[in-house]
């Protein structure tokens, strides 16, 4: 339970904020802005078998693993969810997530639709999911090329997979078109602020209201 909501008797359950999108639509950029501006949000750092990109740091962007290491973690039940995406394995380690939730912190996931569905199944009341769409397919291609961290073959594969991913838009609570970055970021913060105030997340509220009513 974190932050008091206007009254010392009312606290809040942590929530799990899930961001998904086709590759290149802007999840990682938005995740970074969220981490900078919302320090109480804990980022779930995934494990992956994908090769590290030049700009990535092990333990910061991902924990980079061999296929055997990944399988060991998966088979031991160390992953809250996992999926094969663009030919590589990705998963969310359970330990840090459990620790953050137990401490009453909100958690941010940058995961694909397969992972999003698994997390929602595990904790339906605690997941808030947002799907990020690109403004157009030519712009999606431009963003993948401008990022300049993947080979032409990898970019081609990611564009091909975008169709399957975009088809999942209906499975999410919110859908945002990431045209202007700052505008999209402001919308995500508005969603987060509103979801944090949801009646169901306010622990102690029934007791508090009973207390109010007792004095009438
Ligand atoms: P994803 O994590 O969804 O694969 P990234 O966050 O890596 O995507 O973004 C892909 C590229 O697009 C990056 O170079 C990023 O700077 C750029 N980008 C992200 N959002 C926008 C935006 N709203 N307008 C223009 N460029 C953007
Ligand atoms: P990238 O290789 O561009 O970092 O990520 C590729 C895709 O894998 C993205 O859609 C990203 O959200 C997804 N992804 C990253 N980590 C995880 C994870 O732990 N689980 C799942 N299911 N997907 C992930």
Image (cartoon, rainbow, N blue to C red):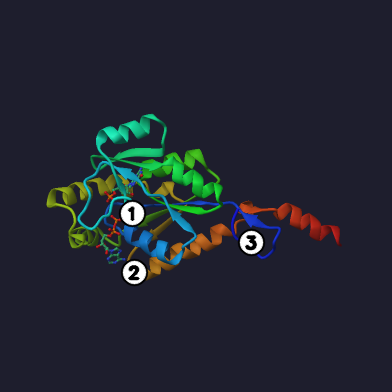
Left/right placement of residue 65 relative to residue 40 reads left
- Residue annotated with mark 2: 180
Q: Residue furthest top?
A: 75
- The 10 Å Cα crowd at callout 3, few under 14, some 14 to 19, many 20 or more, is few
Residue 133 or 192: which is nearer the viewer?
192
Residue 140 or 147: which is nearer the viewer?
147
Split into quadrants, the picture shows ligand 1 in the one at: bottom left
Residue 193 or 107: which is nearer the viewer?
107
- Disc on res. 4: 3
Res. 7 image quadrant: bottom right
Left/right placement of residue 147 relative to residue 4 reads left
Residue 167 or 196: which is nearer the viewer?
196
Count the marks. Answer: 3
Q: Residue at x 50, y 44 (%)?
A: 98
- Residue annotated with mark 1: 60
Q: Secondary structure at mark 1?
A: loop
Q: Secondary structure at mark 2?
A: loop
CB at mark 2 closer than 8 A to ligand 1? yes
Instruction: Measure the C-alpha gap from mark 2 to mark 3.
Output: 33 Å
x and y percentages locating residue 81 in the rendered image: 40, 39
Left/right placement of residue 113 relative to residue 145 reads right
- The 10 Å Cα crowd at callout 1, few under 14, some 14 to 19, many 20 or more, is few
x and y percentages locating residue 200 in the rendered image: 63, 51
x and y percentages locating residue 99 in the rendered image: 50, 46
Q: Residue at x 41, y 61 (%)?
A: 35
Q: Nearer the viewer, mark 1 or mark 2?
A: 1
x and y percentages locating residue 87 in the rendered image: 23, 39
Q: Counting residues from the N terminus, which is met first, the one under dot 2 or under dot 3?
A: 3
Q: Residue at x 45, y 46 (%)?
A: 96
- The 10 Å Cα crowd at callout 2, few under 14, some 14 to 19, many 20 or more, is few
């Amino acid at each position: 339970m974190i932050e008091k909501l206007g009254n010392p008797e009312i606290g809040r359950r942590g929530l799990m904020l899930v961001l998904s999108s086709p590759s290149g639509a802007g999840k990682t950029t938005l995740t970074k802005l969220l981490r900078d501006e919302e320090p109480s949000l804990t980022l779930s750092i995934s494990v992956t078998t994908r090769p590290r990109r030049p700009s990535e740091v092990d333990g910061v962007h991902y924990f980079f693993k061999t296929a055997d290491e990944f399988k060991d973690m998966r088979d031991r039940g160390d992953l809250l969810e996992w999926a094969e995406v663009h030919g590589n394995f990705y998963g969310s380690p359970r330990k840090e997530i459990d620790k953050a939730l137990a401490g009453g912190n909100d958690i941010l996931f940058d995961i694909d639709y397969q992972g999003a569905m698994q997390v929602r199944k595990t904790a339906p009341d605690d997941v808030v999911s947002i799907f990020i769409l690109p403004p157009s397919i030519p712009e999606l291609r431009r963003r993948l090329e401008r990022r300049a961290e993947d080979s032409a073959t990898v970019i081609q594969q990611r564009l091909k997979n975008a169709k399957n991913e975009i088809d999942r838009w209906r499975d999410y609570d919110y859908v945002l078109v990431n045209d202007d970055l700052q505008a999209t970021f402001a919308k995500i913060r508005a969603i987060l602020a509103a979801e944090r105030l949801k009646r169901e997340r306010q622990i102690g509220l029934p007791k508090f209201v009973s207390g109010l009513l007792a004095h009438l």
